[in-house]
Amino acid sequence: MYDSRKIITGLIIFFILVALPFIWNLGKAAPKPDPKIDTPVIQQMAEKKCIELKAVMKTGHMQMLDVWRDSVVRDGNRTFVATDGKHYNMSLQNTCMKCHSNKKKFCDECHNYAAVKPYCWDCHIEPKEGA
Amino acid sequence: MGMDRREFLKLAGITTVAGLSGLTASTILRNGLSEATQFSLDPKALIGKRWAMVIDISKFKTDEDYTKVIDACHRIHNVPNVTDRAPNLEIKWIWKETYGHAFPGQYVNEQEHEYLEEGLKHKPFIIHCNHCDNPPCVRVCPTKATYKRPDGIVMQDMHRCIGCRFCMAGCPFGARSFNFYDPRPYIKEMNMEYPTRTKGVVEKCTFCFERLAVGLKPACAEASNGAMVFGDLKDPKSEVREILRTNYSIRRKPELGTLPSVFYIVGGKNA
């Protein structure tokens, strides 16, 4: 093989460079997100439950918010009838965040972990925390 | 592999039945699983066919009468006050305008005459989005961020606005303002019940769609002490129709054919 020394050195350098980020971050896994729902409003609730089942909210809140947004802004329908028949005002600022007033621990915890950056808070006012 | 005709037909029949019932089962299952939810209007919501505003300008007497309605709107909608920093980038939903600027046709063109009533010449008019029946801003919006609702309100969906400002060019009334900066630092007191806007979107008066949805009249009409009357133009028994029937009223730039839903009563009895 011609130039085997150069080629092998080059290959070694290449593999080191490729593997560097993995080696660098070895054993430094980001901590599992731990969203909290222990806000004062939720603490006082007799039955601690969200508008839909926890599993539904966990996996589907983004679709739900998207549908809500279109329903409220485009169609003007503001009342959401949940599966259990209860009525809710479809509003991120005035319904969701009234209970989940801990945006940092409730929203950001997972969103940062999953590296998603929803632009809700560019316009919608987040609740004042620790106030 | 032997399969006679009889066996084949049996198998085909069973498969068909299984397939059909399977389909039904999955449909039932899917319907059960899908969100058993619905959306509805608030029973208190005000419903109209074409919302309109009648402004009796003779009822605006002092400076305070004007600031009262402007503040009422700008406060609840988190409209930033950027005038100190950049007067030419002003953001406004409702504002004061001179007669000459508000009604250029009447003032500088064919109907112009320099002997116009003194009071009218210098009297500021209260101006907000006309919620035109034929809105040019809606026609030019490339993303349908601004659109006309069935009740006549020319609305905007801030989620869709890309900040192209075609609507600002399209609107002949200057009703729209662009957010050149993040508006938050310029909002003195935030109304936590209503969102702000973000940098790069166009905003304007929404006829208080969020208040109508819970059965309230627009904030300016409520604060105006009867000088601004809000109602349904398509309802012959409404207050706005009654006022329009009994008073001479004008609209801004009628020659453009945008059919504004905001009417001005100039020579009111309170003049």
Image (cartoon, coloured by chain):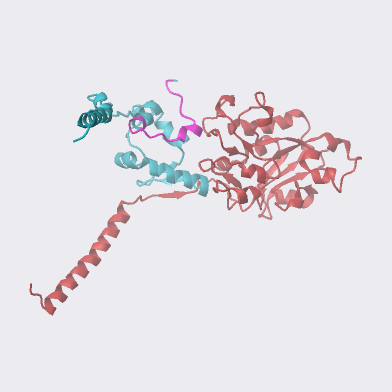
Chain colours: A cyan, B red
Q: Compare residues A103 and A13 and report the one nearer the observer.
A: A13
The image shows residue A60 at horizontal and vertical percentages of 35, 42
Side (left or right) of B54 relative to B19: right
Quadrant location of the N terminus of chain B in the rendered image: bottom left
Residue A115 within the magenta-colored segment of the rendering: yes
Query: From which residue to which does the magenta span run?
Result: A111-130
Question: Does B20 sit left or right of B101 as displayed?
Answer: left
Give whichever of B198, B43 is nearer the camera.
B198
Total marks shown come to 0
Residue furthest to the bottom in view is B5
The quarter of the rendered structure image containing the C terminus of chain B is top right
Q: Main secondary structure of the magenta part?
A: loop
As displayed, is residue B151 above or below residue B203?
below
Q: x, y percentage for residue B228?
A: 71, 40
Percent position (x, y) of residue A24? 26, 24
Say whether residue B222 is visible. Answer: yes
Task: Describe residue A6's horizontal placement relative to residue A37 as left or right.
Answer: left
B178 to A9, vertically: above or below: below
Please indicate whether residue B242 sits to the left or right of residue A52 in the image. Answer: right
In the displayed image of the protein, which residue is found farthest to the left?
Answer: B1
Q: Is residue B134 above or below residue A55?
A: below
